[in-house]
Image: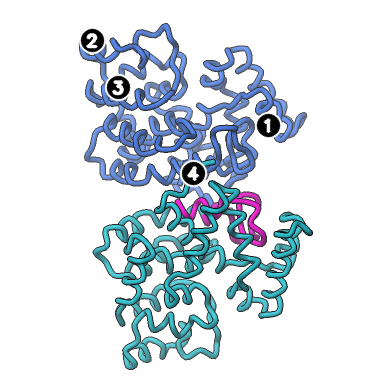
Chain colours: A blue, B cyan
Amino acid sequence: MAMMLEVTAYPKPGNVDRCHDYPSTHFEHFLASAILAGPVLRRAQEGREPVGKLFREAISATNIHTGGNTHFGAFLLLIPLVIGGDIEGAKKVVSATTIEDALDFYDAFGLTKVRMLESDPLDVRNPEAKRIIREKGLTLHAIMEHSAARDMVAREWVNGFALTRKGAELLKLHGSGRKAIVATFLDMLASEPDTFVIKEHGKYIAMEVMSLAQEAKAGRISLEMLDQRLVSKGINPGSLADILIASIYVALGEGWEWEF
Amino acid sequence: MAMMLEVTAYPKPGNVDRCHDYPSTHFEHFLASAILAGPVLRRAQEGREPVGKLFREAISATNIHTGGNTHFGAFLLLIPLVIGGDIEGAKKVVSATTIEDALDFYDAFGLTKVRMLESDPLDVRNPEAKRIIREKGLTLHAIMEHSAARDMVAREWVNGFALTRKGAELLKLHGSGRKAIVATFLDMLASEPDTFVIKEHGKYIAMEVMSLAQEAKAGRISLEMLDQRLVSKGINPGSLADILIASIYVALGEGWEWEF
């Protein structure tokens, strides 16, 4: 439900939404992923299987289409949140991850085309990465610590889901349904540089996106104009969208209303 | 998946789609219903539970929102199709229904606000209906026979899913993905008076919708214009949309491509 509500809300500047597709990633791919993930997420809810295994199976169940990795980052947050039930539970789940979880995460990574820095020894394209994990005894939490500096989704694992929590509070503050989702996304866009944008376009562009979002918040440019600016440059703040999904999940669990 | 693909395709004249909501029924309600139905549809796939019970549970699982009965007719087709695996299997399933199935169907009906003709002794609002079913030993198939003359979804139960089959063939004929879905919907709209429209607006309006769809097929009016005409009069061909969902399900099972 959180995945569906996030992708459906519009206008969500730069991202696939009810009114936008990307050339090779369509709205339907995101919704298909939300539907195909159902059985794995329900198993996560039962809380009897480890994070890494469920994460790998979520990726495996949802990448049967050609639309790319629609929810890689979202699953990285949702799986511990669904297992743990809420943020407090998820914090326990992520701190208890094992080397097996790390290896499963790398197998999941191998199923995708998610990009990492090429210089990184823990890059999934590095055939040595799994050997290094075993030798150094790295847990999935340790991998996320390693990635936290340049990946805001990984950062959620080590900072107690701080931005997820902030997003959930913003959703409640902004009311209910799709308008609250859009307003929350804009708030996040205006206050956090998206690390996916940094990886794809560099830090300067990510800061520019933040400034533009601040302009939109202040009403000096319209959301539609902001959207056009980002889409025309192929800038999609995908990591913030992943965190927004986690925020919606947490907010729904705390009684936030998705209907409007 | 079929439910998601149907509601997402646009423009689907008169109906909720990616670009249209109705005032109290939103796009998100349809997608929520598709997601919430997942567990029941998966049980249907296992084929161990009766149609009526699964139908009642599908309605019960999906009417937790305020958007109304988004998929009542669709479930009436999908449940036997999913249990049976394909149209041939579904024909066996519907012909083997029992009085228990009929009673479960009435319980499901009672959970909704779906309308029937008030003069009908088998109307769900008639407290005598369930007594009549028991006394006359009516199966769910018999109920559908009773309704077939004025309800095209019920008609599918007694004519071997004829329009469902036609829709599946049209989908393949029209290619893949959302364009094929829209073209198939238009073909059906131009050739079949929608019984939901007849119930809501009368036979004359339903025939007028058919003529307008023929105009759109011939390129004399645009799909957008047809859509506006229907929406402005509150005309939504909901039964054809239900059958289209069944057609998409069947076509997907026969290798039709939803990606494009």
Quote the CA–CA distance across marks 3 and 2: 12 Å
Q: Amino acid at mark 2?
A: Lys
Give the residue type at disc 1. Answer: Asp
Marks 3 and 4 share the same chain: yes
Task: Inspect the image, locate mark 4, and give the three-letter code of the amino acid beneath it.
Answer: Leu
- Residue linked to disc 1: A227
Magenta-highlighted residues: B1-30
The label shown at residue B23 is: none
**Residue at image point 34% right, 40% down:** A82
Residue B26 within the magenta-colored segment of the rendering: yes
Give the CA separation, mark 1 to mark 3. 35 Å
Q: Residue furthest front?
A: B173
Q: Are marks 4 and 2 on the same chain?
A: yes
Dot 2: element: helix
Question: Dot 3 corresponds to which residue?
Answer: A140
Residue placed under numbered mark 2 in the picture: A136
**Would you say the residues marked 1 and 3 are in contact, meaning their CB atoms lie under 8 Å apart?**
no
